[in-house]
Amino acid sequence: MKPMVKKLAVLLTAAGLVASLAACGKEKETEGAAPTGMAASTASAKPTDISVTTLAFAAAPTGELEAVKKLNEKLNINLKLNWIPSAQISEKLNALLASNDLPDVLFVEDFNTTPAFLNAIDQGAFWELSSYIKNYPNLAKYPDNVYKNASLKGKLYSLPRVRPLDGHEALLIRKDWLDKLGLQQPKTMDELATVLEAFAQKDPDGNGKADTYGAVMPGSPGPASYLLSMFGAGTKWKDENGTLTPYWWTPQAKEALAFWSKTYKAGGILPDMPILKTAQIKDMLVQSKAGAAIANVVDAYKYNVELQKVNPQANLIAIELPKTADGKAYYEQASGYYGQFLINKKTVNEAKLKKILELYDYTASVEGYNLATYGIKDVDYTVKPDGSVEQTEEGKKKGYSGDTTGQWVTGYFDKYLRAKVSGIPNDVYEANKKVIDAISSIPDPTYGLMKSAPFKEKGADWDKKLNDMIVNVIIGKNTLDDWDKLVKQFKDDASFQQHIKETNDFYKEKSK
């Protein structure tokens, strides 16, 4: 997440914010409540003002959007949207908090890493939503784990911008290479090792040169955690009878390192691993330098479109991760959201809160989301036969796009979002859906937990030591004995032990 700037100043101003909230709290609880009789009818006819501040990844619309007018008419509201360029979001949020002039609804990427917002939440600055969500059918459709992951201390202070829990991890593999070498899709880790080594040693592209490798795996700035979690080590932390243990302390983590080290030596991993970044996975696959990778399910189709421009016979597909010796395939479950919307208790009474939730419940439907994000159907966007949305030139001119107008809504939950893209053939989409259906992923138990005091001070250094050792063991620069020594070093470190204790304390508090 982006680092917060001017933390001390923001913390001080946050204290002023929560003090003012305390002063006006009782007044705001009843302010705006509809009166009885004739006055109630008049009050209900008056549109509810709702202000929302969020981020934008592209230029914000310059004029009033027809979609906003439609929402205003449908829901009897007066919606005011303010977009902040994504590169400035941290600085601008600090300024808003410092000014004590927050909007009704505010986007925050991750309030767990922003002390000022955590302090404001503790002092009652934002609505706690747990008891309200069940009354809004579209919001209630979000998986329980999404809300659980977005919660703080077991309470929900935000509307999460929903995303799939699964589909970000699949084995992308060159089926045409498998066919040429007479190999089957790997179902186990041993079969995966055989395939990756064959891709490196048996000339799968048939050009007579030893210029191919098994898998492309990024190592900079640190290797992806799936290298260890695929063997059942857990995701960052492992819950063992209610107690959290660092995933890399487990026997499965050492087993994973031994596997990848052996595979690397046999050419099963691109030798540039230590310096390769995640963004280069596509390049290595499209250039046929590697025949496998772990990435989003739909990436296989997207990259294959590029591959076939050079080699029409190429066939990169997404398949399930191989199973370990216990017969299980291990996936890391995603958080299920990107960013959260906090609702300001200073400017929003309960009646207005319910109106805001009504708005977000409507935009959590396909119809409402498409209206808010893409504009007027058949004018600003069209829906293709495969169900995908395409922005028209008219819509683009008005400023509609998922990168801007789609950033103020939480969206609707689509389990298969990472299985499809506009124009994908139906047979590929159906195959991708089967891959996602087969996934039984492991949630990260630390989602929604605050960072421990020792981690805030030393976490970056700890992560670097760990990541460097993982890469160095895989490429043979260090041994498994060196790995054992590193684990012992951390176990003997009083600061790291305090980090484990505080993390477990937060975990138990959240689990109540």
Image (cartoon, rainbow, N blue to C red):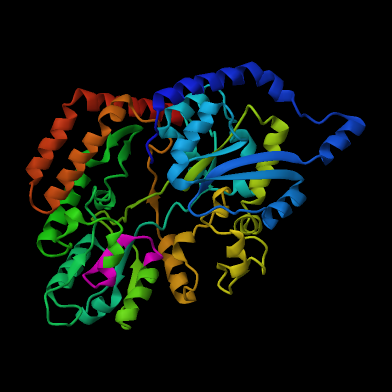
Residue in front for this viewpoint, 139 or 52: 52
Left or right: 143 with respect to 222? right
Q: Is residue 277 above or below residue 195?
A: above
Front residue of 36 and 249: 36
Q: Is residue 212 left or right of residue 101?
A: left
Whether residue 52 appears in this view of the structure is yes
Examine the image and state in which quarter residue 80 appears: top right
Residue at image position (38%, 51%) is 441
Can you give x and y, in whole percent of width and height, for residue 507 in the image? 39, 30
Residue sitting at 14 percent across and 73 percent down?
A: 211
Residue 274: image location, x then y, percent: 17, 53
497 lies above or below 433: above
Q: Quadrant of residue 401?
A: bottom right
Q: Is residue 298 magenta?
A: yes
- Decide whether residue 116 is among the magenta residues: no
Residue 134: tell me if it is visible: no
Residue 438 position in % (x across, y down): 41, 61
Q: Position of residue 306 (x, y in %)?
A: 35, 74
Quarter of the picture containing the N terminus is top left
Residue at horizontal 31 percent and vertical 58 percent from the top: 279
Residue range of the region highlighted in magenta in the rendering: 284-299
Q: Residue furthest front?
A: 62
Looking at the rendered structure, the number of numbered marks drawn on it comes to 0
Toward the right, the furthest residue is: 38
Residue 297 location, quadrant = bottom left
Residue lying at 60% horizontally and 21% vertically, measured from the top left? 21
